Amino acid sequence: MNKNNFEHNPAAENETILRQALNTLKGLVPLEYELGPDPSLREQGYDCTVRAQVFGLQIVWRVQVRNRCTRATETLAQIDNDKAQSPVLIATRYVSPEAAARLHARGIQFIDTAGNAFINQPPLFIFVTGNRPKKAETTVPAVRLFKGVGLKIAYLLLCRPDLIGRPYRELAEMAHVALGTVNGTMMDMIRKGFVLDMGTRGKMLRETKALLDRWVTAYPDALKPKILLGRFQGDGNWWDDIRLDQAVAQWGGEVAAAKLTGYLKPGTVTLYADKNRFADLVIACKLKKDPRGNVEILERFWPPIEGLGEGDTVHPILIYADLVAIGDQRTMETARMIHADFIDRHFGQD
DNA sequence: CTAGTCTTCAGTCGTTTTGT
DNA sequence: ACAAAACGACTGAAGACTAG
């Protein structure tokens, strides 16, 4: 049962949360209510008002609807609660027991869609916690595997499938992305079948051949432009005499292919450099800034560990992707050689 | 219980679209 | 052509979860 988010309308979503929470509250106490959207309140951080009749008692709340209730929400609500004439009510999806205790202590009323509530309108008093949240039905897959930074993680795993079991924190650091990105990418990979999730027994990379193909196709458009540090022009075959410090940069594209196969005469130069040492590299190679130059320097997006490109060249996968992206006769031929000699044998059958 | 790990989501920032 | 607004990707701190 996969819920696609047809539209993402925050206002409508908020109202859904509020109505669900109020209806759940109805289960605890006989309640009639009506929503009173109030534009003047909205500017003060409220979403609407609720007029409720309970046991002939009329209550008016200023409601803040939140997807989730954070400490920031609590603090802000308390400030508002203290200065407002009518009490504040937080309506949210789920309030954990800890959060409920804090809100109770601060005297901030809340209701959630899971059936937890704190209502303190003497003589009416309700305090319910411990109800578990419903299974999340809103999946917002913000991170797309083949679009953007998800490719950094995919690359890491293609080169080092054994890292699949590492904690997300480590993967995030290695791939130079945020923690949340790892989570999103991993979900996408599982959904698309590239990762098999065996629960406590870990994960496995699957369909690596297909993943590789799609990675190579997506990389030039989706990631490469984002990591371009600059374009330059050098003198003649300058790259032939340079000894690269691996800690600073590695060859990609045609130069790397030439070094690997001894076959190609490079027409363009692709360098993957540590962002922080990028300036030194430009100087050491005597490169001149030139938007039309045939030298492109890109930001390296993998860690200096075994298996991510030996010596002064990047991993064959990336060389291959660079060559395919150039896409002319010469490079395609070399690309096929690289694929046959350095990639195929690692990606035979799953 | 708690240390390690995962998940969430509001805010930031860059890009695209729309308005003048 | 320029500026404002809307959009979307990404981040990262903080809360939630879970195995041991």
Image (cartoon, coloured by chain):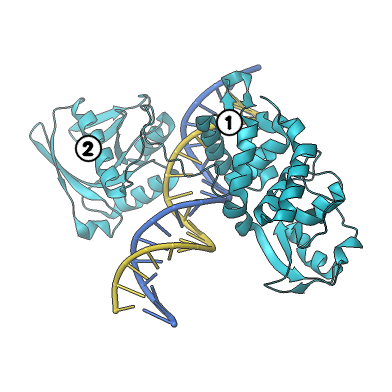
Chain colours: A cyan, B yellow, C blue
Q: Mark 2 points at which residue?
A: A19
Vertical comparison of A205 with A242: above or below: above
Across the whole image, how many numbered discs are drawn on residues?
2
| Residue A169 in the figure: left or right of residue A134 | right
Chain letter for the residue marked with disc 1 in the picture: A
**Residue A86, how many percent across, how many down?**
21, 49
> Depth check: A47 or A52 in front?
A47
Disc 1 marks a residue whose amino acid type is Phe
| Local secondary structure at mark 1 | loop
Quadrant that contains the C terminus of chain A: top right
Residue A194's disc is 1
**Residue A238, how many percent across, how many down?**
87, 67
Residue A240 in view (yes/no): yes
Q: Calculate the distance from the C-alpha at mark 2 to the C-alpha at mark 1.
A: 39 Å
Q: Quadrant of residue A293?
A: bottom right
Disc 2 marks a residue whose amino acid type is Arg
Mark nearer the viewer, 2 or 1: 1
> Depth check: C9 or A117 in front?
C9
